[in-house]
Image (spheres, helix red, strand yellow):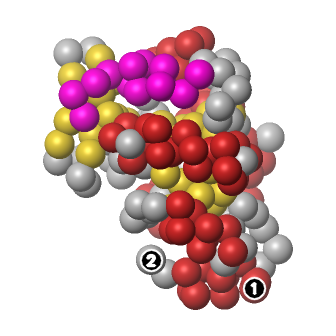
Amino acid sequence: MQHALIGDLTSAIDVKIQSGGGVRSANDVARLLDAGVSRVVVGSLAVTQSNDVAAWLKGFGADHITLAFDVKIEDDVPVPALKGWTQSSGVDLWTALDRYPKGTFKHLLVTDVGRDGALTGPNLGLLAQVRRRRPDLVLQASGGVASLEDIAATRGLGCHGAIVGRALYEGRFTLAEAIAAAA
């Protein structure tokens, strides 16, 4: 955990920052919030320790935690992957989401790991399914964004954000262009 570095970043710029990685306890959540992040991303534990994560959501507030599900598509079924995408959770995404009834959390980040970094476009079908099943959630799309059209397409589905990495690094578009496409 790079709490000090993240704290320096949150102090240096006037933007909301969402950060995660390695969040394993309520103390980790508290330290990131204390460092100035707006939302803490909780991944694998959202699947494997849903009771603990539900308590964190209640204690810290649903506005301060994003549940992140990294999924692999197995026989047309989205299944959360664990341990750096090396293990299957053994449950489908819908079962994992059902552990958090409507009103218990607000922010959801879904990554199709088969597309992450591949610049093949986001899994619009999966994102549309998530929107239909959980319209109550603020959805962030991740995995495969390669173009401004991809950003606009996720926005068109009702996603509230899109994670962009490699496309920016490779100069396919600028951050300003991405923000405009998301508007």
Q: Can residue 60 be seen in this view?
A: yes
Relative depth, front residue between 145 and 158:
158
Residue at coordinates 25% horizontally, 54% vertically from top-left? Answer: 84
Placement of 39 over or under 139, stated as above or below: below
- Is 175 part of what is drawn in magenta? no
**Which marked residue is nearer to the observer: mark 1 or mark 2?**
2
Q: Residues within 10 Å of mark 1 (few under 14, many from 20)?
A: few
Is there CB contact under 8 Å for labels 1 and 2? Answer: no
Image coordinates of residue 151 in percent, x first then y, are: 61, 39
Whether residue 96 sits left or right of residue 118 in the image: it is right
The amino acid type of the residue labelled 1 equals Ala
Image coordinates of residue 123 in percent, x first then y, are: 43, 28
Image coordinates of residue 150 in percent, x first then y, are: 56, 36
Image coordinates of residue 66 in percent, x first then y, are: 59, 47
Of all residues, the one furthest to the left in this rendering is: 86
Placement of 1 over or under 131, stated as above or below: below
Range of residues picked out in magenta: 89-101
Quarter-wise, where is residue 138 in the image? top right
Residue corresponding to mark 1:
12
Residue 169, numbered circle: none
Residue 1, numbered circle: 2
Whether residue 63 sits left or right of residue 140 in the image: it is right
Residue at coordinates 44% horizontally, 77% vertically from top-left? Answer: 1
Q: In which quarter of the image is the C terminus?
A: top right
- Is 98 part of what is drawn in magenta? yes
Relative depth, front residue between 52 and 33:
52
Q: Can residue 164 be seen in this view?
A: no
Quarter-wise, where is residue 119 in the image? top left
Q: Tell me which label, 1 or 2, sits earlier in the chain.
A: 2
Q: What element carries label 1?
A: helix
The amino acid type of the residue labelled 2 equals Met
